[in-house]
Image (tube, coloured by chain):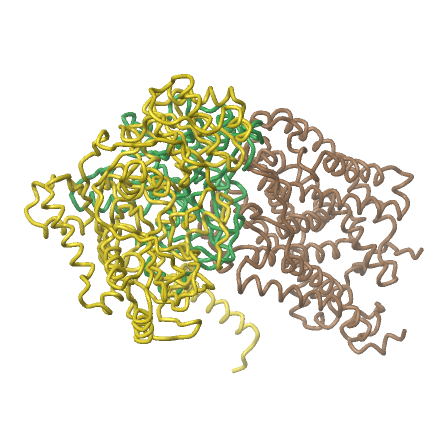
Chain colours: A brown, B green, C yellow
Amino acid sequence: MASAALADRRWIARSEERSSLGRFLLWLAPWALLLAAGVYAGGLCLWFGLNQTNMDNRFAFGLWIFLDLSIIALGAGAFFTGFLVYILKRAELKPILNTAVVVGFICYSGAVTILGIDVGQPLRSWFTFWHPNTHSMLTEVTFCITCYLAVLSLEYVPILLRNRELRKLPSFLIFEHQLHKLVPVLAAVGTFLSFFHQGSLGGLYGVLRGRPFAFREGFLIWPSTFFLFILSAIAAGPSFLMLITAAVEKVTGKHLVAEDVYRRLGLISGTLLGVYVAAKSIDTLIWLNVTSAAAGVAPWRYYEYKPFGTPLLFIEIVLLGLLPAFLLTFRKTASRRGWLLSAAALACGGVLINRFVMTVQTLALPTLPFDEFLTYTPSWQEVASFGGVIGYGVILYSLSYRYLPLFAKPKGDQSHVSLG
Amino acid sequence: MSARYGMVIDLDRCTGCGSCMVACASENNVPSLPQASDRTGLTPMLVRRISNGKQDESRREAFVPILCMQCEHETPCVSVCPQQAVEVDKATGIVMQMPQRCLGCRYCMTACPYHARYFNWWDPAWPAGMEKSLSPGVAVRMRGVVEKCNLCHGRLHSAQEKAAGAGKREIDPADYVPACVEACPTGAIRFGNLADDNDPVSQETHSPEAFRLLARIGTEPKVFYKSKEPWVRALADGSGAEVKRG
Amino acid sequence: MKVTRRDWLVWGAGATAGVVLSPVPWKLLGDTSIWTQNWPWIPQPARGPLEVKASACTLCPNGCGLRVRMAGGWPVGLAGLRSHPVSQGALCPLGFGAHQLIWHPARLRAVRHRGGASSWDEARAAFVKACSEGPVGIVDGFPGRAASSVFESFAQKRNGAYRAVLGPESQALTPYEAWTRVPARNLGFDLENARTIVSFGAPLLDGWGTPGRFSHLWAERAAGQSDPQLRLIHVETSLSTTGSRAWRRIVIRPGSEAALASGIARVLIEDKLVPARGPMPLLTLSQAAEQSGISADAIRELAHTMVASQPVIAIANDDNPAIAALNVILGAVGSRGGIVQRSKPKHSTISTADLRDMRAVLIDSSMPWEFVPETRAEVFRFAAWDGGPTRADWLLPTPALLEDLTDMPTAPASAIETYAIAAPLVAPPTGTLSAAQFLAEIDPAAAPVEKIIRARCDELLRGRAGTVHAQESTPVTNIATAEKLEEQLRNGGVWVGEPPRAAALRCDLKEWPAERPSKPSARSSAWAAPVLPPLATKLYEESNLLQPVPRRNS
């Protein structure tokens, strides 16, 4: 279609082609609806209180915490790609870097928003900063996530400022250029912060000595889940980026990134996943036979509660762990897009199951001998709030894709984008 | 001279009447909201019914009052609260919850293995005029904060004020009796200072029949239980293979 | 001068630094934290001088001693009164929330006639008219009070009927009336001196008799002991709390209590386990075994166990005469640790006139809401709370707990005679009248409750017997005047009579009583108020401790 016909042409980079504004708005419409529903549901929770959810005194954490932990794990691609590109100098991943930043920004801003609704007194959110508890993993998470969100915002701004119209303002151009110099520093800071908060999210559960199902021994003050969460996050992050990029290519009908990039992401993801599965398996054995036994729980007792039986453990570690690790690294499958993406989806699924097991299963299992196994179903407000985050994410990403050079080659880069 | 307030609850004496539950709610201005259920209600003292699992003539039931265990070692809720809204009071050993600082993140509720913490899912409300029946000396909490038993700290405060008014440093133990202890018609709930070797309750904690719930987790609760029944004692280490709920 | 971007940046930076260094943001932060601590719609407790007063709970005939904490002139907390000789500082679980009943949303504040609003004048006119047209029946759920004698004399004067309704504890004593010639109201169970108690379904640990009385006894002498000083044998059809905590638990078929009692009595007589005291039961041992569902050997063993540690007493949950007869065989009637006479019978006019023949029936607020009289008379229902749909024609609002002067006669089942006064601690809402006050307005010749109470105190003083238990115990003989005695009682003191002289009760049972179907008490539970205290949700809805009891008419 003719580039000149677009109503918002001047906002779109000269070399890029985009669909008409009307079509774009049509694309945004259902996501906007989802976002509106989410805002409404979140508003109900803020106004009437958390009784709008189905959480209760036994399930003090529910769908939101599970999904928060999941999207932060999936958004780990942001810091890890930055780490690989700027610290380890793996330049071949540069094309995916901007997407990683935007996806990361969406994931973290979405998570922080949901966390703001998930507390009983949102106006007191700053108390954690004012009276921090150095022993609490949640303090660490709060600090690191807010700092990292600031870092991501700073990483997002240069991308934002590369918009065709915004570039015209010389101060913005200069600002963007200065920020660009900061980016390696931001990447390093981001890596440091992410290492800690990804780990601390695991630490949230690993330190709960009152919940033998979640409790782990570890290294110094850090339970093994601290390290396992980092590993699983950096393993899933690249896979998630693969899926996002593939989805964008599907929706826009364009080839945005070399096949090579997918393969590399897959190799990184698969290798890390393999290491994770090994570590997780060892950890599981130690936990069942040593740690839980010390707390008085016989091994495998946890899995007597249906439907959370041993098949779930098998699914998490083997089906959604070992299998995708293999598929992502084995040459025959890793070289084919279909296998790669399926394996990436399995890997992301594995991380989701892991977060689910740590958040929801931990609370469902009884701790006292006369307690029973309880279940909980999220209310529509909880589901809609998270739907709103997804709507927000798609909208923000779509806007970024349309108006910002997410996949543009940086000036001076001679590598070709192969069409095929 | 710091105290370590604790309890010994004699499960052979508890008849499950529930007086402790109602007295606690009355003393601590806990609302009774019609929309609350057994999973969303506020019961800082909660009596649980247990059985030996049999269905025939040999079936036996007992009752276990559950309240904040006042854990002493690596207190789970204290170490996890992101804004230090919980702390172990050095002078009394009471695990103090500050509802005014609570953010309502509920991390402490996931940490507590005894499920002794409750969240205010709604704002408290009483029918018109009934707020005149609220117990003075206990602040009413708002929605969105966690609360739990604090061993009727308001009564300790009154005892301290009374002692100070009489020019004494130490309180008279008879002046500080938590509501549940006062209400129990069989004297099953006994309260005392575990730091005082002469306190009969402190001595009872060393009895071979005394045990604590989930002792192997190592939180060192200051609420002990006592029973001669073997199936009730199976509660002790958490395995409780013979014990069933309800 | 041209304002450049640089200027903006400089001023902006300077302003930011200035604000940060000023108290403004920090004050605002602090204020926000205070604003979020106390929203204006969160109720706060009253401020005001704290007082502790004593009274008695009037919500059921057990009359537990109450220690009432008051703030700002309103009750803010209830606890038991340790000096009360029967309740010994205990309250039932509902009692701890009873002070909130004053503001229960179902509180009756105006007269209602057949669903519509009315007035006291209209009610009075209708009642006076009814009295002139025919006899009037009065139903009293808490007999023995000063108000009860107001009811009795009113009914007597009008050739009407006075019906006192007894709870299951007192009903269990009615069979002895014919054999001892002593009314059930003057008998009691001497649990304190028993060593074996056989309960036939009576929930001794679960709402029987005065809260605190048996639970204290059991806790001291039985709980947790493998060879207890007090042996509790509980006979029941399905597991209850009492059965679960009992020393021995016997499960029988529903409705076979009389059969089991007969079987036990037969073994006691045939095996000469007791001296010959009474008639042989009609059932044979094998018949008893068959009906109750336990083997003959088990019944024999039970009988042997029962007499192994004496005194032994059997307690029924209704007026089953077979269990009363078993007590005769056991020698429990008129002995220490058994059925004793605690007080002298007073002349009373409890009539057996049928409520169906009445022109009007007045139901006192002490009757449970579920009580539905079988009559087509005009029903005048006194109550402090609205318990839901009702057959009554008139709903008349009365003062509630702690609002009305009442006296507390001896609690059902008590072995010692007691007398206490529940003094009002708060003013009742305007437009409320108790049934006794209502009748006093209609018949000015009737003595008001205050006068009757004073007369009773006078009588106690002149009797020169018993002790007043308050902070200290004072023998009556050391009290100078009736006013002083009454003052002590109004401040939470309890008069306790002399311990019963067991041997004085003579029992004359020639034939084993015929079996008849058990008549359930008109009171399903001791709790009489039409509504539960709001905090009862802790026991029913907010926990799994108790199953909510479905209430009729609700």
Q: Nearer the viewer, residue C290 or C141?
A: C290
- Circle count: 0
Q: Nearer the viewer, residue A105 or B211?
A: B211
Residue at the outermost front position: C510
* Image quarter of residue C206: top left
* Residue B221 visible in rendering: yes
* Residue B171 visible in rendering: no
Residue drawn at x 38%, y 18% as measured from the top left = C273
The spot of residue A252 in percent (x, y) is: 85, 63
The spot of residue C379 in percent (x, y) is: 39, 65
Residue at the outermost left position: C480
Residue at the outermost right position: A420
Q: Nearer the viewer, residue C229 or A373?
A: C229
Q: Nearer the viewer, residue C483 or B77?
A: C483
* Image quarter of residue C127: bottom left
The spot of residue B33 in percent (x, y) is: 47, 57
Above or below residue B188? Residue C532 is below
Above or below residue C18? Residue C186 is above
**Left or right: C252 as drawn, with respect to C473:** right
**Left or right: A267 as drawn, with respect to A378:** right
The spot of residue C316 in percent (x, y) is: 40, 36
